[in-house]
Each structure stands twice: as C-alpha cells, then as structure tokens.
Image (cartoon, rainbow, N blue to C red):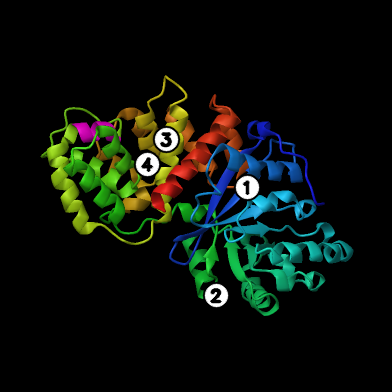
Amino acid sequence: MNTLNAPRVEVLDHISIARQPIVDGDRNVVAYELFNRPPAGARHTVESDVSLVFNAIANSTAPFAIAKSDLFVHALHEGLGGSHWDFLDPQKVIAVIPAVPQHDPERIAKLAPALAALRARGYRLSFPHVVVAPVYKTWQPLADFVKVDLSQIANVQLAPLLAAIRARTGATPIAMKVESSAQFAQLRTLGVPRFQGYWLSQPELLTPRVLAPGEIAAIKLFNLVSSAAPLEAVENALKLDAALGVNLLRIVNSPSTGLPQKVTSLRQAVMLLGYEKLGKWSALVLATASSGQSSLVNTSAILRGRMMELLALQDRTLDPGSAFLVGLLSQIESMLGSPMHITLAQLSVNDDIVAALLGGIGVYGDMLALAKACESEDEDDFSHAFSRLHFTLRQINLAHMEALSWADGALG
C-alpha cells in the first residue's frame, strides 16, 4: 500500500489519545508510547492510526514536533508503506509492529520486505516477544526493541526468554506491565534496561524527603521575582516545576506566614506570600536546585495539572487554578514519601481540592481520574472517567496534546 486516503479531522471526536512513559532502571523517562483507544466495539484501522498521527501534528505541536524523548507509534501491517511515515522523524519514532494472526508463516514472509524498507528509512522497529519464535526468523535481524508482556510470561520463563531475545535479535528488551517493586527489582537483576507499566508512574513510598527544584526553573523564578515581573509570569514559572509549586505551598503554610485563608491556586499562594518574601525564598531555592534529569513523577504532576487546567478553562463553573493544583498535588505522595492525607493536613488547600485528592470526589476528582486514564492503556478506566464528565472527546484530546506540548517544552 503506497497511499492512504486523507484522514478525517473529526477523528478526534471518536478516539481518545494516550501517552505512556517508558523508563530506564533509574526511572528516568527515555521514551513514550503513543496510542489511541477507539470507542467500545470499534477496532483499530490503518485510517484511525494514520488520522491520529496527522491530527496530533495538525492540532498541536505535541507530541511529535517538540517531544525530546523517543516515541513508540503503533503500525498496523497494512500501513507499513503508508505515506504518513513521510511526516514523522525517523530519528525519534519507533514503529511498534504487532504479531501476525495465528503466526502465519506465509504472511510473516510477505511482510519482511516492508519492514526492512521502513527500517532502511531510519525508523527503528519494536516487536512483541513472540518474535523470538523460529517462524519469525526473517524479522529477528530487524528488531531494535522487543517488548516482553509480563502478564503472558511465567516467572520461570523470564530468564530463558531474555536470553533468546539477546541471542536471536540483539534488540533492547522492554518489560511491559510492571506491577510491583519486587518485579521491577527482579527484572533489573536479569539485565532488563527498559520498563513500562502503570506502577512506574506511582512509585512506592520511600523515606520523607526534601524536594529539589530543577536548576533552570529555580533560576528563572529568581530572575522574575528580582525584576518584579508580572504575577502571571511568576505563576507560570511555578507551574513548570512540580517541586517549586509544592515547596511554595509548604512555605505559605508555615507559622511565620500566618495564612488568612485556604489556598485555591498557585497564583493565590504568590499573592499571600508577597514578592518580598518570595524573593528571599527563591534565592534560598537556588542553593538546593538540582541539575539532574526531570523525574517521571515531576513530569506526570505538571502534565496532569496543565491538562486539568485547560479543561477547566472551557467551563465557567470551574476554577482553572484549583484544577491545576489537584493535578500537581496528585503525585505528592511520591514526591515527599509520606501518605497523602498527612501531607494535605499540613497544607492549607481548600476542601474541594482535598476531597478530589483523597476520595476522587467532585468534578475535580473526576477530572483527575480522566487525566490518570490518559497515562495508561486501560480503556475501562478512561470510559468510566469520560462518562462522569461533560467534556467531548475532542476537548479532552486537544487538552491532553496541548498539555503534552507544554510539559515537554517546559522540561526540555
């Protein structure tokens, strides 16, 4: 297939777009997998997957134009020769190739030249772990990544499977559906370098810790406050680093500040603290700023906050500042290493925010569930969250993509 019909713009009304991180052994984000979820009863087609690509490019700079990490993009067999590959960056995009139904040898052989041609253009290829089977021998030299679905592999089979992947393909293994810290540790011991799974966006609690904001964000905040920049500019600087935002809330809540009311947004927190105290605090922040890579937790927190804020802007009954704060604080357990209810008791945030974070209650709780669902491949979670809100799929998709662009640009 050399050409495809032009994708319909209205596809954003009929599919939901998600992006799931792939991390290394230190849980640093090294790539993302982009995929769509068609409505219940529908199936993926070449047209829907191509439309996803074109609409992502046309409606937002995210996730293709600005993402700093590799992107895993699904490719149906029928679309391997499609013209949409002309619009993607081979240096950034990895094509995720599914197995052949019933592992038909004739079909596997026929697809090998198309896969080789795609790889010759510079695209890397990712295959499921069944590629180590003898019937896929013609595909094995083309593999750059092999995904190991842990839900389909018995624990005793892991070591032999990984050995076969290395021996027959030389590809990088990626462990999918990592569900616990014990599983993560075992896989690292076995030499697996890449990991994917919903558990990874919810790291287990460690010891309570002090958050170290990013160096660039800390310098920007210091410069803005020193030059008496507009309130909006200061607020935006705080939004771009989860550690900055959370630390500000903790400072505002200190006894020396004497909060007259509960906080509903970062903007309000800045106003309550005042530029003089904020300037002194931002100078202190520079001493503890980290120059390390942005963590998965930090990325997830600001992405959730921005997506929720963008959705709230489309409903006059909602407060965008509160929506952002719910998303930002949704990862506070992982940030600080203490239970959510204990940390929230130390922060003077309003009751709607607390209810959303502790019990998923209210519209902000429903919006948070939706933002979380956009980070995973769980269609049931997304459908449930979507049914409880009045936003259209188009509004959700555009908010998600714009949030991806914003977060990627901020953390790049």
Nearer the N terminus, badge 4 or badge 1? 1
Q: Tell me the crowding category of disc 4: few under 14, some 14 to 19, or many 20 or more residues within 10 angstroms, Cα based.
A: many
Q: Residue at x 72, y 61 (%)?
A: 118
Q: Secondary structure at mark 2?
A: loop
Q: Which residue is mark 4?
A: 328
Asked if labels 1 and 4 touch by Cβ distance under 8 angstroms, the answer is no
What is the CA distance from the residue labelled 4 to the residue labelled 1? 24 Å
Q: Tell me the crowding category of disc 3: few under 14, some 14 to 19, or many 20 or more residues within 10 angstroms, Cα based.
A: few
Q: Which residue is mark 1?
A: 35
Q: Is residue 301 left or right of residue 137?
A: left
Magenta stretch: dominant SS? helix
Q: Position of residue 282 (x, y in %)?
A: 19, 48
Kind of residue indicated by mark 4: Leu
- Indicate the quadrant where residue 278 lies: top left
Q: Residue at x 40, y 39 (%)?
A: 327
Q: Nearer the viewer, mark 2 or mark 4?
A: 4
Q: Secondary structure at mark 1?
A: strand
Q: Residue at x 84, y 59 (%)?
A: 102
Q: Tag on residue 321?
A: none
What is the CA distance from the residue labelled 2 to the residue labelled 4? 35 Å
What is the CA distance from the residue labelled 2 to the residue labelled 1? 28 Å
Q: Nearer the viewer, mark 4 or mark 1?
A: 1
Q: Which residues are magenta?
A: 266-271
Nearer the N terminus, badge 3 or badge 4? 4
Residue 105 sits above or below residue 205 on the image? below
Label total for image: 4
Kind of residue indicated by mark 3: Gly
Q: Position of residue 207 (x, y in %)?
A: 30, 59
What is the CA distance from the residue labelled 3 to the residue labelled 2? 38 Å
Q: Nearer the viewer, mark 3 or mark 2?
A: 2
Residue sticking out furthest to the right: 106
Q: Nearer the viewer, mark 2 or mark 1?
A: 1
